[in-house]
Image (cartoon, rainbow, N blue to C red):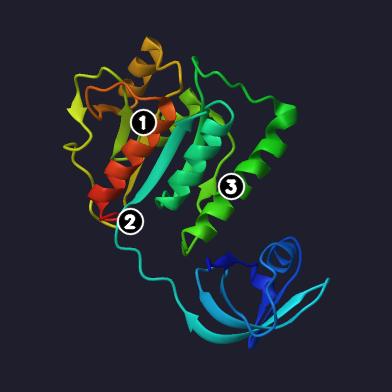
C-alpha cells in the first residue's frame, strides 16, 4: 500500500487522527478496517508505520508503531519548467514528473502554447494539478510533495532563473549539446532547471531570449517527439544522471 500524506496537526504521538478528505478515500475506496497497517508521512518528511485502531464517518484513529526520518538529500534538485500542454497531456506530465522525483514543477505560458489559462479558472486548475501530484507522490512513496507553482509567463521565468548555474532548454532540431553529455552539478544544494516547450514548439524569439538569459539549448536526439514524451524522456535522462534513477 502507498504512503499517505497527512497534515502536521494530525500527528499527536502516540496516535494519528485523520479526517476528510483522506478519511473518505481510506474508508470508502480502500475499505480499511481496524487492525490494518497504514503508512503515513507528515510535511517534514517523517514517516509513520501505524495500525488502524478505529475508523468512523468522522475520523480514523491510528496508533504509531514505528517512526522513520526522511533520508538525507544527496543529489541536486530538478526543477521542471513545462510549457502548459493541452488537457490530459499536462496532467500526465505532472503525474510522471512527480513519480520521477522532480522537486518543483512550474507551468509556463508560451507563444505557441495551445492552452491559455484564464484567471477565473486558475484556482480550479491549480487545485487539480496539486491533487494529481499528491496522488502520484503517494503512489510512488515519495518522502515529500513536489511544489506545483501557478503558471508564469516565459519571460518572468527566464528572469527568475537567469542567475542559476545550470539552466537547460530542450529544443527540437537543435544542433547544440546533447542532454546526455551536458555538464550537471553534483552537490545536493544545487539545482537543475529544465525548460520544455509546448506542442507548437518554441518561437525563434523565445529561443533567443532564453539563451540571452543563460539557458543552454540541448537536444535528446534526432527524433521529433510529442511534447509530453519529450518532457518525460528529458526528465528521466537528467534524473538518471543525477543519481535519482538506476
How far separated are the C-alphas under marks 3 and 1? 20 Å
Relative depth, front residue between 146 and 224: 224
Q: Can residue 73 be seen in this snapshot?
A: yes
Mark 1: give few (<14), some (14-19) or many (20+) Cα within 10 Å.
many
Q: Can residue 104 be seen in this snapshot?
A: no
Residue 115's spot in the image, x, y percent? 59, 22
Relative depth, front residue between 32 and 104: 32
Q: Residue at x 51, y 59 (%)?
A: 139
Which marked residue is nearer to the observer: mark 2 or mark 3?
A: 3
Q: Quadrant of the C terminus?
A: bottom left
Q: Residue at x 31, y 51 (%)?
A: 190
First-in-chain label (2 vs 3): 3
Question: Where does label 1 land, which residue?
Answer: 230
First-in-chain label (1 vs 2): 2
Mark 2: give few (<14), some (14-19) or many (20+) Cα within 10 Å.
few
Q: Residue at x 19, y 38 (%)?
A: 180
How far separated are the C-alphas under marks 1 and 2? 26 Å
Above/below status of 128 relative to 215:
below
- Mark linked to residue 189: 2
Residue 128's spot in the image, x, y percent? 65, 42
Amino acid at each position: 500500500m502507498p504512503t499517505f500524506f497527512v497534515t502536521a496537526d494530525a500527528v499527536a504521538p502516540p496516535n494519528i487522527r485523520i479526517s476528510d478528505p483522506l478519511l473518505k478515500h481510506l474508508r470508502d475506496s480502500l475499505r480499511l478496517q481496524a487492525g490494518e497497517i497504514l503508512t503515513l508521512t507528515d510535511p517534514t518528511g517523517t514517516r509513520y508505520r501505524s495500525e488502524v485502531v478505529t475508523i468512523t464517518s468522522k475520523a480514523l484513529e491510528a496508533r504509531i508503531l514505528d517512526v522513520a526520518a526522511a533520508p538525507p538529500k544527496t543529489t541536486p534538485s530538478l526543477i521542471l519548467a513545462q510549457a502548459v500542454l493541452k488537457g490530459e497531456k499536462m496532467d500526465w506530465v505532472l503525474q510522471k514528473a512527480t513519480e520521477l522525483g522532480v522537486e518543483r514543477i512550474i507551468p509556463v505560458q508560451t507563444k505557441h502554447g495551445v492552452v491559455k489559462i484564464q484567471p477565473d479558472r486558475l484556482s480550479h486548475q491549480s487545485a487539480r494539478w496539486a491533487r494529481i501530484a499528491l496522488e502520484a507522490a503517494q503512489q510512488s512513496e515519495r518522502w515529500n510533495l513536489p511544489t506545483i507553482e501557478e503558471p508564469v509567463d516565459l519571460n518572468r521565468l527566464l528572469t527568475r532563473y537567469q542567475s542559476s548555474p545550470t539552466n537547460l532548454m530542450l529544443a527540437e532540431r537543435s544542433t547544440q549539446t546533447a542532454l546526455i553529455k551536458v555538464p550537471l552539478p553534483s552537490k545536493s544544494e544545487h539545482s537543475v532547471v529544465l525548460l520544455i516547450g509546448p506542442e507548437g514548439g518554441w518561437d525563434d524569439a523565445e529561443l533567443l531570449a532564453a539563451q540571452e538569459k543563460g539557458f543552454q539549448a540541448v537536444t535528446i536526439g534526432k527524433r521529433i517527439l510529442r511534447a509530453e514524451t519529450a518532457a518525460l524522456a528529458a526528465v528521466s535522462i537528467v534524473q538518471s544522471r543525477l543519481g535519482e534513477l538506476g
